[in-house]
Image: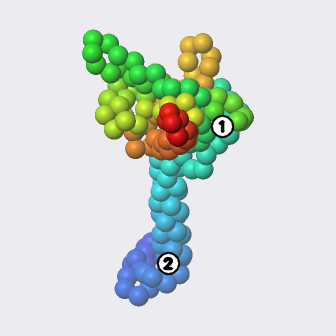
């Protein structure tokens, strides 16, 4: 006659739950979670750390939005932009020998840099970190992220010759 359907086995519990395929799946799940966390940490690090300085001559217009650090000498005095007695921005050019790159600083950061007397002058050694942007006239510029990412070493003042005194 018709036999009753077989009763399914109860799910594995206790120590049997950790044995067999379930333990392999748990290990794989943990390894994938660890790998995903490492990947997220790496992406955060890459986004927030510009790394070592790059050559300005090697930068391309297709690299807009890239976080970079440039190092070189200020090609001229920084131009502090003012409107109505307030500082609205700062611009200067960095030259590393392979090319020149304009650096643009926003109003709040420019006010802080001017207050700290950290506006670059011609010949000063400059290290700046920021994001590359493409201006409407198709030239690359570096938008400074914050004033702390600008390292400035003033050029040594030329020695002053002693004045000749009459009678000596």
User: Which quadrant holds residue 114?
Assistant: top left
Check the image and name the residue furthest to the left.
85
Q: Secondary structure at mark 2?
A: helix
User: Which quadrant holds residue 72?
Assistant: top right
Residue at image position (40%, 77%) is: 11
Can residue 36 be seen by looking at this rendering?
no
For this rendering, which residue is in front, 33 or 101?
A: 101
Tell me: residue 10, above or below residue 149: below
Residue 98: image location, x then y, percent = 72, 34
Q: Which residue is mark 2?
A: 23
Residue 149: image location, x then y, percent = 45, 43
Disc 2 and disc 1: Cα gap in Å? 57 Å
For this rendering, which residue is in front, 162 or 33?
A: 162
Horizontally, residue 102 falls left or right of residue 144, namely right
Residue at image position (41%, 22%) is: 80
Can residue 50 be seen by looking at this rendering?
yes
Q: Which residue is mark 1?
A: 96
Horizontally, residue 98 falls left or right of residue 134, namely right
Give the number of the mark in front: 2 or 1: 1
Mark number for residue 131? none
């Amino acid at each position: 006659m018709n036999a009753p359907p077989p009763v399914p086995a109860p799910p594995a519990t206790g120590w049997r739950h950790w044995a067999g395929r379930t333990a392999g799946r748990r290990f794989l799940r943990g390894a994938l979670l660890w790998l995903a966390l490492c990947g997220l940490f790496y992406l955060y690090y890459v986004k927030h750390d510009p790394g070592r300085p790059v050559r300005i001559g090697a930068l391309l217009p297709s690299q807009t939005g890239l976080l970079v650090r440039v190092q070189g000498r200020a090609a001229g005095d920084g131009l502090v932009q003012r409107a109505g007695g307030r500082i609205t921005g700062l611009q200067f050019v960095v030259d590393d020998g392979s090319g020149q790159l304009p650096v643009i600083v926003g109003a709040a950061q420019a006010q802080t840099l001017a207050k700290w007397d950290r506006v670059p002058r011609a010949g000063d050694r400059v290290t700046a970190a920021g994001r590359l942007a493409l201006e409407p006239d198709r030239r690359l510029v570096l938008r400074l992220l914050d004033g702390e990412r600008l390292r400035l070493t003033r050029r040594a003042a030329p020695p002053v010759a002693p004045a000749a005194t009459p009678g000596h």
